Image: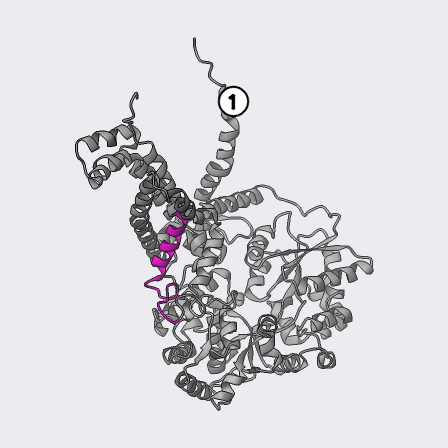
Amino acid sequence: MRPLIAMGLVAMAAVVSACGTAGPAEPGAGGVKVWALQDPVLNPIEQKSIDFFKSGGGNASLETFGNDPYKQKLRVAIGSPNAPDVFFNWGGGNLKEYVDAGKIADLTPVLDQNSALKNAFLPSVLDGAKIDGKYYGIPMRGMQPVLLFFNKEVFAAAGAQPPKTWDDLLALVDTFKAKGVQPIALAGSQAWTELMWIEYILDRIGGPEVFRNIRDGKGQGWKDPAVLESLNKLKELIDRGGFGTNFASVGYDVGGASTILAQGKAAMHLMGSWEYVNQLGQSPDFVKKGSLGWVAFPSIPGGKGDPGNVVGNASNYYSVTSGSSQVEAAKKFVSTALHEDSYVQALIDAGDVPAVVGVEEKLAKAANSEYTTWIYGQVKGAKSFQLSWDQDLPAEKATAMLTQLQEFFLGKVSPQQFVDAVAAR
Amino acid sequence: MRTQRPSGWYAVPAYGFFALFAVLPMVLVVYLSFTSWQGLGTPVPNGTANWSRLIADGEAHAAVGRTVLLMVVSWLFQTPIALLIGVWAAGPQRSRAVLSSIFFLPLLLSTAAIALLWQALLDPNFGIAAGGTQFLGDPDIAIYTVVFVISWQYIPFHTLMYQGAARAIPASLYEAATIDGASRLGKFLHITLPQLRYTLVTSSVLMLVGSLTTFDTVLILTGGGPGTATRILPLHMYITGFSGFEMGYASTIAVVLVVLGTALSVAVMRWSGFRAMSSQQEGS
């Protein structure tokens, strides 16, 4: 009964917000209200940036929420009198929905007036919150490209090298299957882990333009032949047993896929850069003895995409709500507190790779420098950084796509059926 | 002497809460079902677009099918077990109290805890059936696994109902049957079962309507997966509304759920003659 009641309450919120032309909130005692995700590592750092802001005479407070409830709460709150002044987001199509609804303040003038601020961030990452030529967010944490992790011990035991090309990857699948090791770990009960595969394959085969057209509703969209070709490639990998047989009920949040990689039951794992920190927390010995390896996603010969391109989450951003009574203070907060040295250093110390120009030296001095320097170089050298599709598409399209993708991985939907189904939405 | 009835005003808080938290949201959900609303800004009326979409939506139809399957299988699985344990637990055996307390345990755990527990227990790599049958990963099996977990949680509750009702059956009926030379099975079939028929109705209504709106267990245990194998209607509504943010269409699904749930309980009541309930207790 609970979801029904939830629906009902949402309905009430809708009508309440529709009736009252609810004005902006009174300037609260807490100053600029900042909303962010609950994260034991990140939250103290976020608090630090607020303290920094306060020391400069500003006033702000931090509120945090769990992942899924956050997205729902934000949705309902934005446009209501309880909206935050500054909020954590993922940029891309997700943010675009709020921008289109006129709820987000344009930060372009702030960046234009302050070239030091604009030049402080890597352009490809700053572009993650650029919508219709305007900037709506400032990067506030590390970059999270997706990369291929592997277990060095398992590779050594099989006398294998990490894959450089797609054919290498297919050959490795056979090698590891013969050894009784699952070639690739996949947390398939959560569709976004499956999404990473098709994101990279399509980028390698058709280049980043294909998905941009899909997102912008241009050209052939999903009907581009590169999409079908990519799905066929992926199907070959699935049918060959690349992901083993039981991925459908393996969960990422409960550590299912990461653990089998660390235990040597699986050889490779395609995951966001946060996987390193995750492994360091869950299987510290595995990381500390140097068994966790990483490479870029293999190239696909003959494909149009640059093998240096990356996909993933460019960063997370702070955006300012346009209805806020404290727009100016909020703009001041995001333009001063997010690239100053102590904040950047705190992110680096936490194992993050900030999207700030010229942090190579700092990275080299900090812990895990081999990994963080590699990530920084990888993103800096990338011609394109495609945001995860589920963040870059409007929510209803993303949800429908993820459903189809899970069916596709189970073999219930063919490549052609996938294309037809998502193109119809 | 005429009994003084309490003033009708005493019922106001109850009616107030019911109106505010049940009737009003329901009315608004019906309104939203005729709008398009992404959760941002103001709902835009779009006529019957959501309803025609529902009629053409294969995913929603499949979800209704799964919900009915879940409902029927749940009932078929839970009722006999709850009935037998309940009747047994009403007896005078020595081990009864201890075992009944143990059977009762699952009911004391929270739904979320139960779902997480079974999820860990059935993990494909580290669970009890690792490497064997994929109880949560096989699209053909997953829904039965869900039924099993729900049953594991709720059988104790229904057992309790049957136990209470079986205790209330007058001992004189059994004594008379014993004198007439009835067997144990005969007594169960001809005395216990008929005497429990209203409990059976109550328990069935709770089970059927409960299954129709089952949500939390499925969300945590499988999230509707693998693929859409366990995406029942309430979950389909949740995913549409809170992942896809299509609140208007999700409200349409919610209206269907309300109608189905109400129709189901009315139908069971009518069909079973619940209103005409009588007691065969002495003196009444």
Tell me the crowding category of disc 1: few under 14, some 14 to 19, or many 20 or more residues within 10 angstroms, Cα based. few
Residue topped by disc 1 = B9
Residue A402 appears at what percent x and percent y? 45, 66
Q: Can residue A90 be spotted in the picture?
A: yes
Asked which quadrant contains residue A302, the reply is bottom left
Would residue B169 appear left or right of A423 to someone viewing this image? left
Residue B24 appears at what percent x and percent y? 48, 37
Would residue A270 appear left or right of B277 to someone viewing this image? right
Decide: is A282 above or below A167: above
Q: Nearer the viewer, residue B49 or B187?
A: B187
Residue lying farthest to the bottom in this orientation: A159
What chain letter is assigned to the residue under label 1?
B
The amino acid type of the residue labelled 1 equals: Trp
Q: Which image quarter is the C terminus of chain A in?
A: bottom left
Would residue A306 appear left or right of A376 to someone viewing this image? left
Q: Is residue B138 rendered magenta in the image?
A: yes
Decide: is B123 above or below A101: below
Residue B57 appears at what percent x and percent y? 35, 57
Q: Which residues are magenta?
A: B131-154
Q: Is residue B222 rendered magenta in the image?
A: no
Q: Can residue A209 be spotted in the picture?
A: no
Coloration mode: one colour
